[in-house]
Each structure stands twice: as C-alpha cells, then as structure tokens.
C-alpha cells in the first residue's frame, strides 16, 4: 500500500534539528577561521549546508576539526534564543559582515527573504543566539543544542557556490552536513548513500547498455542503445494501453514550429531562456518545440466542438527540447532532449473534477505497478507578487481554479500539501514527488490546470444552451519523460527489472558446442512466443556464461546440456537464485508469458 506524505518538511522536528546544526557548524567554522565571513545556511533535503567566505580552501582535516568542535558545542547544552530587532540594530550587530548587511538591506526593503524567495509582506528581522554565536535568522530551531545528538550528525563534503547563486558574484565554500534524530537514522542514511552509489542510473545505464552520451552529439542529448529502446517501447506500450482504456486519442505533431505559435501561447515570454535559439528561413523564425501543448490546442481547434464531444483527450509521446544549462545537466534526470508522456484534456467546468481525479487515479495505478510505496501530491499555487510577471495576471481565475483543485482532491479523499509560488504560468498544478526503493526522492509527474491559454487560441465548444464556451485544459504526464522515468526505474530496481520490462528476458546457455543448435532452437521458439531471448553459444565455460547473464541482470537463464537435449527438456536458473531442472520448455513458456502479460513484479 503506497504511503502518501502530507507533512511539510519545513514543519518537522527534523527540519529544526538540521537548521540548528547548521548554526552550530557556523559557530565552529568561525571559531576556527575568525577572519571568515558567514553567509546563509538552510536545511535541505537530508541535511543542511552553510556558505562561507574563508581565507583558504577547506581540507578533510578541517572537516574533522569542525565536526569535533560541533560535538563540544552541543555538549554545552546551550539554548537557542530568538530576538526580534530593528534593521538598524541588526546592522550594528553585523557591522563587520558584508553578506549579512546585504541580507539586512533586502529584508528592510521587503519583497524577498534571505534566500531570494518572494514574500507576501515585509518580514520581521530576528536573530538567534546559542553560546557565543549570533546569526541573522528567522528560525525555526530546537530549544537547546542538546537536542542535536552527538552521534547523529556528520559533515559530508565541501563544494563551490556563488553568492546568491549568481555566477557574477564571488565564489564561496559550501559546507554540507547531515543530521538526524538518532544514531540509527544516521547510519541508515549513510547506508542508503552507499546503496545509491551502486544504483546510480548513470553507472547502471552504462553497465546494462541502456544509454550513452557522446560529445559529438552534444551534452544532455542521450543516445538510446537497443536495451534502452526496449525499455522505452515497453513504457510507451504501457501508457498506450492505459490511455486507450481511459478514452484518449493519440496524435503526432512536428518537432519545429513557427515563432508565432509560442508568442500566441505565451510560452516565449516565460520560457525563452529554456528554449533553443530560433532558426530563421525565408524571413520566418522557427523554434524546436519545448512542449507539445500549443500544437495540441491547434488540433482541438481544428474543427467545431459540442459539449457532447467533451471531454477530448489528446495524447502524444512527442520529443521536446529544452536548453538546460550545462551545469544543471545530470544523466537522464536533467537532459535537453526528452520524450514526454504528454496529454491534454479539454473539458467543461462541470467535467473538471472527474477528469482531474481520473489523472490522479492513473498515478496510483502506476505507483502500484512499479512498487512505489511513498509519494507526495503537492498542490502548487501562484503568488500575488508574481502576477503579470511569473504568472498570468488574472487573480480571480487563479483563486477559482485553485479552489477547484482543492475541492477535487478533498472530494476524492487524496491527501496533499500546498506549495506557494510553484504553479505553472497558466494555472495551478499537482506535482508528484516519489521515493525509490532506497528512499531517495524524485520529481516525477505533473497534473496542471490551464485556464489561460485556451482562450488565446480561441478554443471553444458549444454548450448545452447553444452558447460558445472556452474549455478548461488539463496538462498531464503521469509517466514523466522516458528519460526521467528510466533513470528512476534503474535506481528503484537496481537494474533488476521485472520480466515484462527487462530488455533481455531469457538467455539460453549451452554447456558445450554440441548443444548450440538446440540452444538456438529454444531461443527462436521463445521469440516466436513473444519472449525476448538470445542464445549464448560462445566458447566460454558454462559458469562464465551464467556469470555474464547475471551481470546483465537477465531474469531467466535456461541451461541446456547433453541430458536436456536428449530428453528435449531444459533446466532453469532464475535471477533470484532459485533453480529447476529437467522440465518441458512449454511449461516455462506458459510461466513467462503469464508474468509478462500481467506485468508481474515477481519472477
């Protein structure tokens, strides 16, 4: 049973521990480097960091010394004391700290917090003090340093970071740490990190011959090898089956389009930095498409529609291109070329709740199929400050559609958390975060409401009263992109895919050359039954062949020797270590076809 996460990280006790540990770390660093300049140090996923402007680069020995001093500080059982002060008082306290002074000036003006996030109103300025250290901070923190257990935190690494994320600013040193409620949790996390290294999708992708990158092709542009091609085909087959059952129609659209389309849709002002530069031919600018939606709008508007035709559900596995910065590219998780499990649902307001929740139910089916046991549905909202800049300037429709999504989720009994200032430019959305089998979080899918763009394309349908009405549009991608989904599944399964998804489902292994023809005959019969199979007839010894199949994580190995050939039987070795000798091939074929047809998780 999948677990829905509903508590906001910022409201957890663990968040307070990590925020407090960041302050303790800053105290230790400033005691060791009194000429250094501290900046900011927030909690992050699984830990915390603090950025420093220091007189020299930190060494591994420095980290040991900082960690030792941190343990001494928490042993002192110092209270975290909050004091609200004026901007003038803050400037006096941090007179020799230029980064803090810049933060104070920003807080004094209002509009943005210390991390650069928009604020609804001018914030109070506060400081927190523990022991001899005082920091500009709004909290929250634990009450006393004794709540930071000595054996439940660890400094992890040092990295470079530009002040306020601007490469034109000075580069600082970012010191990362992790903190947990107890020693057991820390040990589990460190074990998870080791497991994550083994399951790294980039490492497994190479070993299992799934995908490659090539500099002559370009960074962020994956080349799918035959095994990767099979994974993509299986995922697409799954999506098509699910969407056929749900009443979707499949469409295809070109990869390039005129600039006018994205000006009309409104994407260019908001997405220009993420789009490849245009090509100009015969005085007309063309863009490689970063999304499919404008073209789907054109398809919907290509003929008259009645309320009786709605909802219209248009689905496409179209390849889109977005220019991610080089420093942000990461294996298959952040790429420049992506094949998206995209669809757009055009519906009336009265149909909205059913259609929106139909997509949420599709998520749940995929969670069950892939064994995703932990997830969070996040309702991403607009911010008033972003209207006309980051978001379409229509406050009434924002409030209305956000309430519609809340009501749909509440009526459907689906727990969710809310996140302000994370909506799409044209409407609110549900973003889906999932956790892999080893507890790592991934951003997977989205379910977006569009109240703005359909009217820009003059989309309409005739309602039951004979009047024209603009449809709502739901943008959804439950399986994300092939790239991100395969990256997640590689880690989630550690490359041990269930039979239906495995690129190679069966490897037939001959013990000696005398069984080669028999092995090939079996492989051919398996393929004729729709089972992906190959025969290893190399000159290697049987154990070496088995080892090679295990390295490629093949679910089933059929071993044939003299006895099997004479009896017209096979012996089976399963990836989980179980074996079965001397049985009819037809029996195995029936077993494998059943697992594949049901998309079973077990072997």
Image (tube, rainbow, N blue to C red):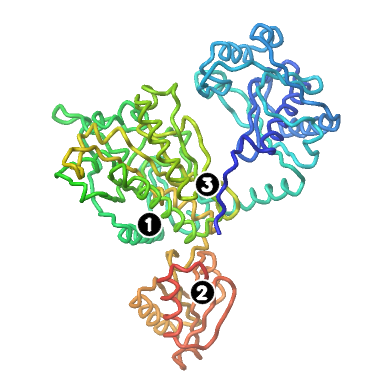
Query: Which of these two is toward me, 539 or 171?
Result: 171
Q: In this view, does 285 lie to the left or right of 135?
A: left
Task: Report which residue position mark 1 lands on.
Answer: 232
Report if residue 119 is visible in the image: yes
Q: Where's residue 82, x and y in %? A: 73, 21
Q: Marks 2 and 3, how far apart in space?
A: 55 Å
Label 3–label 1 contact, CB within 8 A: no
Closest to the camera, between mark 3 and mark 1, is 3
**Residue that sits furthest to the front in the current view:** 465
Q: Marks 2 and 1, how far apart in space?
A: 32 Å
Rendered position, 323 above or below 101 = below
Closest to the camera, between mark 2 and mark 3, is 3
Secondary structure beneath disc 2? Answer: loop
Closest to the camera, between mark 2 and mark 1, is 1
Q: Where's residue 407, x and y in %? A: 44, 42
Query: Which of these two is toward me, 49 or 374?
Result: 374
Q: In which quarter of the image is the N terminus?
A: bottom right
Q: Residue 540 carries which label?
A: 2
What is the crowding at mark 3: few (fewer than 14 residues within 10 Å), some, or many (at least 20)? some
The residue at 30%/60% (across/down) is 244
What is the crowding at mark 1: few (fewer than 14 residues within 10 Å), some, or many (at least 20)? many
Query: Which of these two is toward me, 326 or 118?
Result: 118
Task: Report which residue position mark 3 lands on.
Answer: 415
Label 2–label 3 contact, CB within 8 A: no
Q: Where's residue 440, x and y in %? A: 58, 48
Rendered position, 185 above or below 20 = below
């Amino acid at each position: 049973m999948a677990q829905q996460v509903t508590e906001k990280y910022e409201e957890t006790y663990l968040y307070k521990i990590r925020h407090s540990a960041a302050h303790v770390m800053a105290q230790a660093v400033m005691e060791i480097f009194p000429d250094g300049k501290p900046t900011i140090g927030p909690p992050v996923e699984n830990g915390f960091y603090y950025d420093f402007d220091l007189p020299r680069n930190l060494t591994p020995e420095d980290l040991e010394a900082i960690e030792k001093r941190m343990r001494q500080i928490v042993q002192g059982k110092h209270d975290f004391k909050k004091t609200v002060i004026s901007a003038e008082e803050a400037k006096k306290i941090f007179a020799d700290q230029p980064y803090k002074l810049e933060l104070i000036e920003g807080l004094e003006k209002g509009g943005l917090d210390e991390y650069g996030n928009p604020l609804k109103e001018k914030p109070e300025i506060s400081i927190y003090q523990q022991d001899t250290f005082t920091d500009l901070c709004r909290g929250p923190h634990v009450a006393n340093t004794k709540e930071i257990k000595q054996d439940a935190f660890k400094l992890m690494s040092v990295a470079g970071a530009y002040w306020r994320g601007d490469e034109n600013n000075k580069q600082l040193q970012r010191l990362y740490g992790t903190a947990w409620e107890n020693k057991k949790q820390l040990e589990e996390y460190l074990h998870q990190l080791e497991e994550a290294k083994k399951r790294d999708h980039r490492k497994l992708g190479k070993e299992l011959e799934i995908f490659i990158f090539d500099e002559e092709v370009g960074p962020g542009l994956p080349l799918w090898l035959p095994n990767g091609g099979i994974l993509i085909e299986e995922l697409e087959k799954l999506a098509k089956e699910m969407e056929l059952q749900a009443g979707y129609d499949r469409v295809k659209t070109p990869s390039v389009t005129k600039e006018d389309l994205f000006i009309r849709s409104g994407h260019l002002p908001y997405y220009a930095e993420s789009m490849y530069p245009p090509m100009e031919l015969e005085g007309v600018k063309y863009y490689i498409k970063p999304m499919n939606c404008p073209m789907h709008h054109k398809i919907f508007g290509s003929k008259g529609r009645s309320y009786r035709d709605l909802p219209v559900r248009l689905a496409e596995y179209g390849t889109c291109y977005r220019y991610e910065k080089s420093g942000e590219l990461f294996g298959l998780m952040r790429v420049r070329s992506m094949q998206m499990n995209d669809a757009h649902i055009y519906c009336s307001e009265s149909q909205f709740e059913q259609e929106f929740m139909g997509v949420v139910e599709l998520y749940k089916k995929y969670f069950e199929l892939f064994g995703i046991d932990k997830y969070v549905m996040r309702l991403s909202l607009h911010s008033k400050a972003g209207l006309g800049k980051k978001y379409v300037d229509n406050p009434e429709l924002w409030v209305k559609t956000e309430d519609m999504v809340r009501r749909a989720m509440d009526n459907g009994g689906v727990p969710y958390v809310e996140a302000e200032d994370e909506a799409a430019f044209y409407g609110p959305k549900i973003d889906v975060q999932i956790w892999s089998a080893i507890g790592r979080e991934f951003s997977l899918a989205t379910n977006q409401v569009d109240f703005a763009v359909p009217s820009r394309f003059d989309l309409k349908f005739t309602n039951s009263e004979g009047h024209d009405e603009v449809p709502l549009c739901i943008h959804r991608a439950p399986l994300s992109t092939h790239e991100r989904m395969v990256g997640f599944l590689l880690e989630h399964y550690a490359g041990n895919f269930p039979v239906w998804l495995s690129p190679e489902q069966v490897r037939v292994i001959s013990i000696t050359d005398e069984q080669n023809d028999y092995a090939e005959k079996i492989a051919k019969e398996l393929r004729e039954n729709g089972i992906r199979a190959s025969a290893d007839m190399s000159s290697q010894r049987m154990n070496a062949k088995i080892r090679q199949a295990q390295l490629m994580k093949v679910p089933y190995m059929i071993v044939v020797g003299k006895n099997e050939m004479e009896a017209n039987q096979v012996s089976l070795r399963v990836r989980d270590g179980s074996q079965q000798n001397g049985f009819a091939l037809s029996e195995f074929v029936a077993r494998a076809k059943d697992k594949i047809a049901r998309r079973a998780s077990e072997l």
